[in-house]
Amino acid sequence: MSTVATPASGRKPEVQKEDAMWLQKELINRNYAELARARAENRKVSATFVPGNLNELLMCFDFARSLPETNALQNGMRKKSGKFIMDAEREGQSEDVCTYVKADLGMMQGGEVGPTGEPLPRPDVLLLSYTGCFTFMKWFELIRHKYGCETVMLHVPYQGEGRIAPNMRDYVVRQLKESVIPTLERISGVKFDIDRLREYMKESAKAEEDLVAVLQSAKNRPSPIDGYFGAVYYIGPIFTAFRGTPEATQYYRQLRGEIEERVRLGKGPVTPDGEMGEERYRLIVEGPPNWTSFRDFWKMFYDEGAVVVSSTYAKVGGLYDFGFRHDPDHPLESLAEYCLGCYTNLNLPSRVDMICRYIEEYQADGLLINSIKSCNSFSAGQLLILREVEKRTGKPAAFIETDLVDPRYFSAANVKNRLESYFQMVRQKRGAAVGAH
Amino acid sequence: MQQIVGRCQALFEDLDFGAVKAWKAAEPGRKAIGYMPVYVPRELVHAAGMLPVGILGGGDQLEVIQGDAYYQSYICRIPRSTIELGLTGRLDCLDGMLFPSICDVIRNLSGMWQLMFKDKYVRYFDVPQNYQDEVGGRFYVEELEVLRRDLGELRGAPIGDDELNASIAVYNENRRAIRELYAYRAARPWQAPTSEVYLVLRAGMVLPPEEHTRLVRDYLAATDAVSRPMRDNARIVINGSFCEQPPLSLIKSIELSGCYIVDDDFMLVTRWLLDDVPEDGKPLEELSRAFLHRSASTAAKYDARREDKGQFLLRQVKGAAAEGVVFAAPSFCDPALLERPMLQDVLAKHGVPYTAFKYAENTGQMAPIREQSGTFADSIKLWSAA
């Protein structure tokens, strides 16, 4: 593998990416093209959320698959979300609520043109996987209310006790059997075939194995990847419309190969400006990234030699690094466990445990929390997470505040100042530790 | 009547939960379990011989100092004032806390409580968003069973079906009394102003349900015995206040601006189940059926069908002969604020006028709210005259 200045397709690059990053971009764009063609090809369209998404199941019914959060973040990265949000607010949405929701509603109001400029068809079914985020429920109710799309609910109980009780798993399985699958059969006109589901799940497990190897490669020094800004690209296919497809398997195999080669060569991550220089800080990050200033945000890190060795956001669509794999021998139970195990479906103590474990296993210098105004699911309680992690690990933690896709809530100067202070704190802590010895 | 309202006001203002402490002190070994607003099955707590205590934040009398260090500026106020109550020892009289399924903030608050108050019983109480008996119902009965077992362990003896049925009867009676109170207010709002009704309801958060039922009926009898002047006010329903409560002065301001509040969603837990739960069946299954099929609609619940959206509110409007709706939601309340445009749309289609504003439990500036609700009341009067 090499860090490439030219993408596989031969286009002139705007930024530097690894080969697998270009492949990832092509996959995502291909999905938008599929969605744009869906009506002409007489395909039914589904929409669902990233956390706990049931891609393998939706593929069993031949649905083209749209993910509104991905649409919102893609629009955010392309600087389109600010207008959409204001359009939704003019239509009566509150300034206080989730900007993903408003970006999505604003996009629909604006003619349903997707992030790539191609039309996004109105979904035939909204699969309301109520996992890890209460707002999902209102989001799809709003779309159903406005556009008349049919909605099917999959309620995933919260891991309030820090574990998956049998009752929780059984409940999700019963919903799949009694409600979700019959609805998807009816809308798609395709009969459910559990063996087809098993085949997709076998494919998922292969990709999951390789993804985990990629994410855990950050335990090396230097880390060959950035487990937050880079991982956003790595998790794209598996958390969206590709998990369970041979393309995803191929993508993760290729990615793993590239990363293993970087480890062998002792290289650090690839950034949009090329190879990262010396690795000076190893961080764990909690919370989603800001999408509207994604590149500027990342630059603040790599300019300082800061690499994120692991992040909770890279687990938002599923937690694989502690052992979960889709299990084709127990397909529905496995889908249920997958949904129940998404990061924001974990209670606060479990999230604290996980972060402390990352700090230790990845030999991180500390924790940085990017608190997102829009996302209570992540944000409410993060200040306690910060205190607990500092108390347990003795490592410094810091807090910055941005938003997902609302450009009004990204203050570059403030974020940069905070980061610089944090890096200084890490250095002081190191100095103190050396002095103590 | 003044005596009853005065007592309720004192209970409302007592952020040290003196009534709970007194109840516990009256008999050794008594336990109290707190719960956040919206819905928890208080029958189970009562059946364990414990006092269910409604925790509704700190209101406008509590200075939040420590609690603010736990929450960013863009998170609503009720979790921060509840943390403040906990950190200042005001909730030490509670032996446990239940956090019902309301929103992401309260969900995460349950975990914060687990981390901060390790010696207390804490449970996140999930409720199904699937309303089929064999799907959501089975899940819910099991959740109830876990809570029943936990509370039984906490008191040192399992809770029997007979005890539960007896508690269901107690709460049926309490709900009946509250339905009477609401019906009375809807019929004669000048006789039962909401600033008083609210205090009577709030008393039910800290008093045993038997005592609260008596208090509600005593209030009804007392207020009916005095004649109060009837005004030409607009009859309105308040919506959006099911969790973080508005300050009492806000309720008074709305009334002073020319509105009679004839229905609302304050402290919905007291009216969540819409009719009697059978008292002689399998109690957990009966509680489940009541929740699934005969309970109030709020933004914390999924509406299974598009055409169901807003119907509960419309029924409130029609049932109370209201002339308009005031959407009053706490700032940063995702459920209420996301729900609002859908409800407004339904109201618009049915020709029901509405207005909307936000508040926090410590909102102090009432002039803009008074102006807005006053203008709204005036416009209703103009339309109805036309």
Image (spheres, coloured by chain):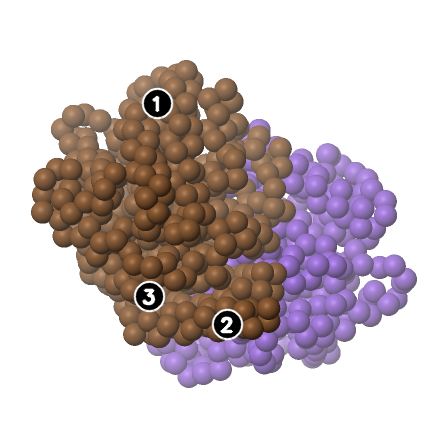
Chain colours: A brown, B purple
Chain ID, mark 1 = A
In this rendering, would A433 be left or right of B330?
Answer: right
Read off the chain for label 2.
A
Chain letter of disc 3 in the image: A
Residue picked out by circle 1: A60
Looking at the rendered structure, the kind of residue marked 2 is: Gly
Height in image: B331 above or below A190?
below
| Residue at the image position 71 percent from the left and 72 percent from the top | B90
Location of mark 2 (residue): A431
Is residue B369 or residue B363 the one in the foreground? B363
Residue designated by label 3 = A304
Compared to residue B163, the image places residue B251 above or below, namely: below
CB under 8 Å between callouts 1 and 3? no
Q: Tell me the residue at 52%/49% (across/down).
A: A361
Q: Residues within 10 Å of mark 2 (few under 14, many from 20)?
A: few
Spot occupied by residue B143 in the image (x, y as percentages of width and height): 65, 40
State how far apart marks 1 and 3 are (Cα). 47 Å
Q: Position of residue A81 (x, y in %)?
A: 23, 57
Which residue lies most toward the right here? B28
Residue A112 shows in this picture: no
Precedes in sequence: disc 2 or disc 1: 1
Dots 2 and 1 on the same chain: yes
Identify which residue, A350 or A73, lies in the foreground: A350
Name the quarter where the N terminus of chain B is drawn: bottom right
**Helix, strand or loop under label 3:** loop
Q: Amino acid at mark 3?
A: Glu
